[in-house]
Image (cartoon, rainbow, N blue to C red):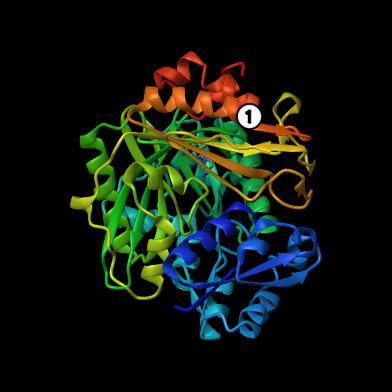
Amino acid sequence: MKKVLIANRGEIALRVIRACKELGIQTVAVYSQADVDSLHVRFADEAVCIGPPASKDSYLLIPRLISAAEVTNADAIHPGYGFLAENAEFAEVTRSCNINFIGPTPDMIRNLGDKAFAKASMKKANVPTIPGSEGLVESVKDAERLADEAGYPVIIKATAGGGGRGMRLVRKKSDMETMFKQAQQEAMVGFGNPGVYLEKYFTHARHIEVQIIGDSHGNVVALGERECSIQRKHQKLIEESPSPVVTEALREEMCAAAVRGAKEVSYQSAGTIEFLFQDNKYYFMEMNTRIQVEHPVTETVLDIDLIKEQILVAAGEKLSLQSDQLKLRGHSIECRINAEDPDNGFRPSPGRIETFHVPGGPGVRVDTHAYAQYVIPPFYDSLIAKLIVHGKNRTEAIDRTKRALDEFIVEGIKTTIPFHQKVMRNESFIKGQFDTTFLETEKI
Ligand code: MV4
């Protein structure tokens, strides 16, 4: 691999450029007219404007991305996260143009994007799954029968959905007909696929996910877990590794399950197996076929570079990581610094950053594309920086995060920094006692 085009923007584009530079690989940035002044454009070896600000006219336009790769002679494309990262057609077109797609094969993206299929694959590999339907549910009658078996509440999920989109919670039998039809309808309108499946609803679950990576030679390793329960409306705000509730024995079990699941689908590239965790039991929920926002918490506790590894396995190399050589060291916490106003319902707060001072010192990493006088465009997601803090244990990581947040000065726009300062002082958070309902329950 000689030259990688990064089909993305923001901090992740920069993150991929950094990995490429360290590997001696040339980089091509693509940018919309709204991103001319973005750092990924500056730090890439070459940059190609691919269209107007709206994502659908630039970062989501497959022909423009492929053209940009062809005119610059890029031999690979890294999709980052979001945008086209889990678009099987993009992976397919990229490959058919003889360009290496840094991710799984189109079939894997397509199959695992079908949540009922993914669940069936995991079940086949003896990975614990959430009790509910075997595959799709075809009728209200079937849904009622399955719900009687599982016990209410149940949840109906679009098989083409994911990440919180296309779900209906059903609390009692008399709600089933309405909710089932709504879920089907919404799945059809939203995803062009009416398929839905049913699960028992866990009311106080944690979201714990296992990072995996596989190569093209059949090797797969699991890289520990991330605790991602601190989220609001399906947007994660804080992630950490290890999870405060995962013991060494449980970690080994969950990692072994993740590896079985990944091998079942012959998975290659970086991926994540998401689990719901309740009453000390874990259940497969979804698989993500991309590198995720929160990958740095795994990198910092294991002292690895996931993006480099992802690039190397895409180039056909054997995995350099081996489970017995990986040692979990200390604790890492990531705070997502968004251009949002936490005092006003996390309303987006784009505009000019007047002052931008990033924290430093022991254990502190900041991944950001922002700088003083940078203007945050209103067209994309509001993530402006990730603060990743490592400590010898969870207490030190929390204390360091508090210290780093106090040093993080952003003026001109609202950010989630004050929100994070409150969470770091919250008693339940400090004790590690929380689940995905934390932000609804606690007054932060
Ligand atoms: C669930 C659940 C409880 N029980 N499924 C939300 C996002 C999508 N990935 C699946 N989600 C959930 N599925 C069952 N059977 C609770 C959620 C859920 C959730 C999951 C992870 C992180 C945050 C969440 C917030 C609300 C609901």
Q: Where's residue 275, x and y in %?
A: 40, 42
Q: Nearer the viewer, residue 37 or 311?
A: 37
From the image, tell me which residue sits under label 1. 417
Residue 244 shown left or right of residue 1 in the figure: left
Question: Residue at the location (67% across, 81% down)?
Answer: 67
- Crowding near pointer 1: few (<14 within 10 Å), some, many (20+)? many
Figure check: 359 above or below 5: above
Question: Residue at the location (55% across, 22% down)?
Answer: 423
Residue 292 shown left or right of residue 269 in the figure: right
Residue 389 shown left or right of residue 384 in the figure: left
Q: Nearer the viewer, residue 373 or 396?
A: 373
Q: Is residue 352 visible?
A: yes
Please identify the quarter of the rendering in which residue 442 is found: top right
Q: Nearer the viewer, residue 33 or 123?
A: 33
Where is the C terminus found, in terms of image quarters? Answer: top right
Q: Where's residue 35, x and y in %?
A: 75, 59
- Which residue is situated farthest in the top direction here? 427
Residue type pointed to by label 1: Ile
Residue 317 shown left or right of residue 45 in the figure: left
Q: Mark 1: is the Cβ under 8 angstroms from ligand 1?
A: no
- Which residue is situated farthest in the left direction here? 324
Q: Where's residue 75, x and y in %?
A: 51, 81
Where is the N terminus found, in terms of image quarters? Answer: bottom left
